[in-house]
Image (cartoon, rainbow, N blue to C red):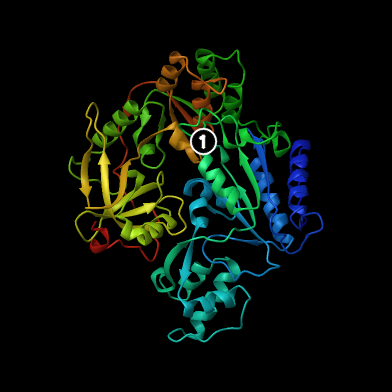
Amino acid sequence: MTLPELRFSDDQAEAHDRVTELLRGFGVDLDEGSHSARTEGKTGVLAITGKAGSGKTLLLAELVRAAVEAGVEIVSGDYESKRRKERRTLAVLAPTNKAASVLRQRGVPATTIHRIIYTPVYDPEYEKIAEWLTGECDRPEIEGLTEAALDRAQAFYASVASVPGALAAAGLKGSDFIKGWKRREDPLDIGFVDEASMLDERQFDDLRELFPALVVFGDPAQLAPVNQSGQMVFDRLAGPQTMELHRIHRQETDNPILDLAHALADPEVDFERFERMVEEAAARDPRVELAPRVDSDLMARSPVLVWRNATRIRLIHAFRHAHGAPADALLPGEPLICDGIELPLKHRKKRIDLEARGLIKGAQVIYVGPGRKPGFSIMHVIGAEDPRLSVASIVKIEMPEEEEPFIPYAATMGAAFLHGAAVTIHKAQGSQWPAVQVFAPDLYAASRAGRVEAGQPLWKRLAYVAITRAEERLLWVTRYRLARPAGALSADDLTAAPAPLTLTAEEARP
């Protein structure tokens, strides 16, 4: 079977050539499929921007494929072979677990920025297996592991190039072979960063220090990080360091969700006209729905996107009431958002461990059930490669018109969580869901406020980000109403990881 040749649009081809030229200057030739040893002391950065549907992900995936064919190794964050002068590496990064998982679902081996900044420290004995799997040494003899176990590890690695996965296939737990995490000290090589509109200036500067050759991909129509004056980090780059993709690629049949998103660029389209466009799209295509009420069943895995915090809190309260959630506990299956990790300095290693496992500020998690000790919870981290963990938790449920949140679970110290049945559009950036509910009354309120961000009405930026979170189905909610759930909340749809990471009571003490 002969696969059809990949054809870029003119602007994609030009962007591909710009990245190829940049990397050639660093000794990686994508055209020739070859590389040479890295030249120290040289730096370069390039930003590829474009709106949703402009082909950024397709371009990114093709660049990664070409780099691998040129002999460049992917740094995934789980294991790295020993550094050699001639070794060239590429890390594909995203700001959040969810954004990284979106790339992985499309065949791009992405990990989070945080996962690259911190690297695992392996047990020396089991590190021999990793070195063997990556071709650095002969097959080892490991006390306590049979030849059959090593065969399983080899077979797994041959199908999925994951060292932790291969070690798990041999019957080992994560705590057997990973003894801790350390902050990376030496710079890496080439970095590709998706969802660059989410980066703040400090993160961008850190990445430029870490990667001599850095290519960032971002959407200029999204929302800039809070307290950054409406500007993206790539806005500060000089002209030759940026390129924007203008052509919008669609499926064979037009995508009504993208059509609506790009209609927002028309200065003649005000909120009322846009809502009529949503009605017209809903009348001709089932992928757009004009919804008179919020779907409470959908909220359990796909949060309602809102602008105002007051709306978010009211919807969360209504969601819990509709599911009959008790006032003093969570139900298995309730969605949460990590609000940070509150641990004393002496437990810095445990903080690194939790964050490297995906429990970073803004991570989406699902409550699975109580832990074995008071204040502990079993959580499922959405988008993480090893999602199930047990952690000392401080769960805060904000209540309408009350300053202090209700706290059903509170360890002395640990990870803090907010409820996630509804989230602000700012926090939704970088995430995508098959179906997305956008709370239109909030966008109407934003339009009436008359605020402008970077020359664009704020409500249009909010609407653009919210709409483009939907992969397959957009629900435009028009009323302050909530539909009763069709079924009970549950965590049965979540796949558990084999080895949970536990934060002990002793470790949780200040």
- On screen, residue 164 versus residue 50, left or right, reads left
Residue drawn 40% across the image and 58% down it: 352
- Residue 458: x and y in percent read 50, 22
Q: Which residue is mark 1?
A: 470
Count of numbered labels shown in the rendering: 1
Along the horizontal axis of the image, is 20 left or right of 463?
A: right
Q: Is residue 130 left or right of residue 411?
A: right
Residue 327 x, y percent position in the rendering: 18, 40
Q: Examine the rendering and report whether any part of residue 140 can be seen.
A: yes
Q: Pinpoint residue 188: horizontal percent, then vertical percent.
A: 61, 58
Between 223 and 437, the residue placed more toward the observer is 223
x then y, percent, for residue 50: 65, 34
- Seen from the viewer's position, the closer of residues 37 and 4 is 37
Above or below: residue 86 compared with residue 341: below
Q: Quick one: label 1, few (<14), some, or many (20+) residues within 10 Å?
A: many
Q: Would residue 487 be found to the left or right of residue 114 on screen?
A: left
Q: Nearer the viewer, residue 385 or 121?
A: 121
Q: Residue farthest to the right? A: 32
Can you say which quadrant of the picture contains the N terminus?
A: bottom right
> What's under tag 1, amino acid-wise?
Ala
Q: Is any part of residue 493 visible from this angle?
A: no
Q: Quadrant of the C terminus?
A: bottom left
Task: Give the secondary structure at mark 1.
Answer: strand
Q: Is residue 390 above or below residue 138?
A: above
Could you say which quadrant of the image residue 70 lies in? Answer: bottom right
